[in-house]
Image (spheres, grey):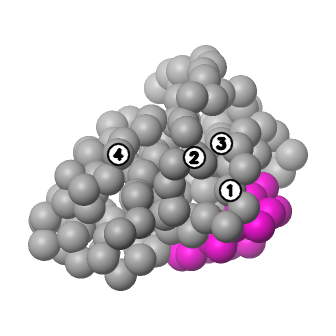
Amino acid sequence: MSKKLVAYFSASGTTEAVAKNLAKAAGADLYEIKPAVAYTRADLNWQDKNSRSSLEMRDKSSRPELADANANIAEYDTIFVGFPVWWYVAPTIINSFLEAYDFSGKKVVLFATSGGSGFGKAVAGLQPSAPGAVIVEGEILNGRPGEAKLKAFAEKY
């Protein structure tokens, strides 16, 4: 049986709730991807072209600093990576996370929360950050997916 990790970034708590429930349903360990500088409400204002999140998402080379790099990725075969969809892709902090570790030979399964869009080009935007990994577009897990749905999702991978 492969060992699984649920790693997630959550700006408002929505993705965090899904990640915790997914980890429980999958029998996986849990790891929070934290920025070195937490996002404020103003930072997340997508309507402000000069907000922190808007500036990061406009600059594809942006790599927000991580608070730590303590996830022991080597222990895991499958890593579920969760995030809110920003501008039809993963926030650039997910690139920061993937680039902080060696994911060679690992399966990275994406899951996300979204206010209305799908994954867009998330896989294409993340693959260069994890050379040697297989990145799979999982599912958008909005609302409060039940344990049966989360267990079925985890078992697919």
Circle on res. 29: 4
Mark 4–mark 3 Cα distance, whole angstroms, equals 17 Å
Q: Are marks 1 and 2 in contact (CB under 8 Å)?
A: yes
Quadrant location of residue 48?
top right
Q: Horizontal placement of 2 versus 27: left or right?
A: right
* Number of the label disc, if any, that sits on residue 103: 1
Q: Which badge, 4 or 1, comes first in the chain's sequence?
A: 4
Secondary structure under tag 2 reads helix
Question: Mark 1 is on which residue type?
Answer: Phe
Residue 75: image location, x then y, percent:
52, 48
Q: Earlier in the sequence, mark 4 or mark 2?
A: 4
* Rendered residue at 49%/41% (across/down): 9
Q: Position of residue 140 (x, y in %)?
A: 40, 69
The C terminus lies in quadrant: bottom left
Considering the numbered disc 3 on the image, is that residue within a helix, a strand or a loop? helix
Q: Nearer the viewer, mark 3 or mark 2?
A: 2
Marks 3 and 2 close (CB-CB < 8 Å): no
Compared to residue 29, the image places residue 129 above or below, namely below
Q: CA distance from mark 4 to mark 1?
A: 17 Å
Q: Residue furthest bottom?
A: 156
Distance between the Cα atoms at labels 1 and 2?
7 Å
Marking on residue 73: 2
Where residue 121 appears, as percent x and y from the top left, is 68, 72
Q: CA distance from mark 3 to mark 1?
A: 10 Å
Give the total of numbered labels.
4
Discs 3/1, front: 1
Q: Quadrant of the N terminus?
A: bottom left
The residue type indicated by label 4 comes to: Asp
Question: Can you tell which mark lies on residue 97?
Answer: 3
Q: Residue at x 21, y 70 (%)?
A: 151
| Mark 3: amino acid | Phe
Task: Tell me which residue sits at (71%, 27%) in the image.
Answer: 65
